[in-house]
Amino acid sequence: MGAIASVRKSNTAIQLREPTDFGERNFQSALVIFTNACNLECSHCFVFRDDNPNEPRDKMDDANMLHQLRQLRDKHDIKYMLFMGGEPMIRKDLLVEAMKIFEHCSIATNGTYGIPSVPGHLVSVSLDGPEGPNDAIRGEGVFRKVEKAIRERDMGDGTSVMLQMVLTRQNEAHLEDFVEEVKDWPVTGLAFNFYVPTRDDDSPLVWRDLKERDLVVERLIALKRRYPSFIKSNIGSLELMMSDVCKEYIGEDGEKCLLRNVLPLYMGDEGSFERTFCCYGNDVDCERCGAYGIFNQAFHLAQGNEGHLLITGASV
Ligand SMILES: C[S@@+](CC[C@H](N)C(=O)[O-])C[C@H]1O[C@@H](n2cnc3c(N)ncnc32)[C@H](O)[C@@H]1O
Ligand code: SF4
Ligand code: SF4
């Protein structure tokens, strides 16, 4: 990485560095771990797993973040960027600036720093169940704090705000209660993802086998039939997640997975980007992967629909 230019900030020259070389191919979609810092410690979080670049001190300075994202956009023709972390709202001012770089943006946030006003863009706010189960996963007081932020925001500002729940074996029992609780909140809808485990994961989060997970997928399909506009999951996409067919869209070790076409920009050593095996990091068990985006993308391709590869459950 060579220094190509410098900018001045508070009398200190900041060296602008070239981004890491990720080859020549185009990536229509990418995600960026905007910061490795986070104020929560959610029990299911893939970001802070041992095998991932996630050292909080390796923060990229603001000027380099903007410069490197622009360079990568131009080199790989990136049209769609998902801003996540860590918690991206920890760098809110920079986030708003960085969103100007890409044609299409969305933010995944834990909602505890308020809901950003980003007209024309999607903000996906994570909650993983009703108050008790959510707070057991995300931390004491988080549910009510996020609810308050959602209710207090300016509803007319043109930002699309969606909730996102990650289903695990630990919180699946609360699926229906959660939908009942939030269905009248002032949000565009509720999206779902399923847990993505590590290879040796035998935690209480992971289903004993995919057939056990099928029962939860079926419950979600039933909820979708009941609340078709509020629940942002496609029945056709969910059907591709079922245990008898899901491998067709994943392969033995992720080789068929369409989410591998998304460029994951993790925050690596010395404030430079690193690419991981997939969006969910390096240590992932593809066979048991619950990433809705894979099946949703496969579903849309089969329908002949073009579109952006979105990795969150908020892709409908
Ligand atoms: C990693 S977080 C980063 C953004 C923000 N901090 C948040 O919590 O939304 C992005 C999304 O990934 C989800 N997630 C975390 N670990 C996961 C896992 N192992 N499998 C599936 N989704 C996961 C989170 O629940 C959240 O909805
Ligand atoms: S808030 Fe997001 S990044 Fe932070 S621990 Fe929870 S899921 Fe991970
Ligand atoms: S873990 Fe899931 S998203 Fe990642 S490559 Fe494997 S199947 Fe695809």
Image: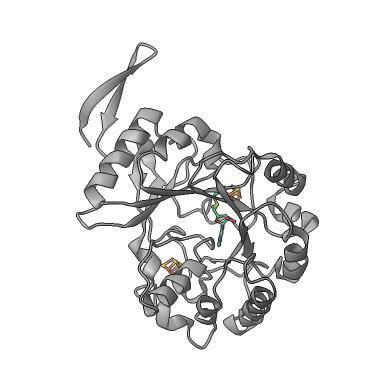
Residue 302 vertical position relative to residue 70 in the rendered view, above or below: below
Residue 229 vertical position relative to residue 116 in the rendered view, above or below: below
The colour style of the image is one colour
Who is closer to the viewer here, 54 or 104? 104
The spot of residue 55 in percent (x, y) is: 47, 41
The spot of residue 307 in percent (x, y) is: 38, 64
Q: Is residue 314 left or right of residue 135?
A: left
Furthest residue to the front? 156
The spot of residue 251 in percent (x, y) is: 39, 79
Viewer can see residue 276: yes
| Quadrant where the N terminus is found in the figure | top left
Q: Is residue 200 left or right of residue 5?
A: right
Furthest residue to the bottom? 244
Residue 187 vertical position relative to residue 258 in the rendered view, above or below: above
Residue at position x 75%, y 67% in the image: 174
The spot of residue 225 in percent (x, y) is: 65, 77
Residue at position x 26%, y 33% in the image: 17
Residue 50 vertical position relative to residue 298 in the rendered view, above or below: above
Who is closer to the viewer here, 30 or 314? 314
Q: How many marks?
A: 0
Viewer can see residue 20: no
Furthest residue to the top? 11
Q: Residue 234: name its quadrant.
A: bottom right
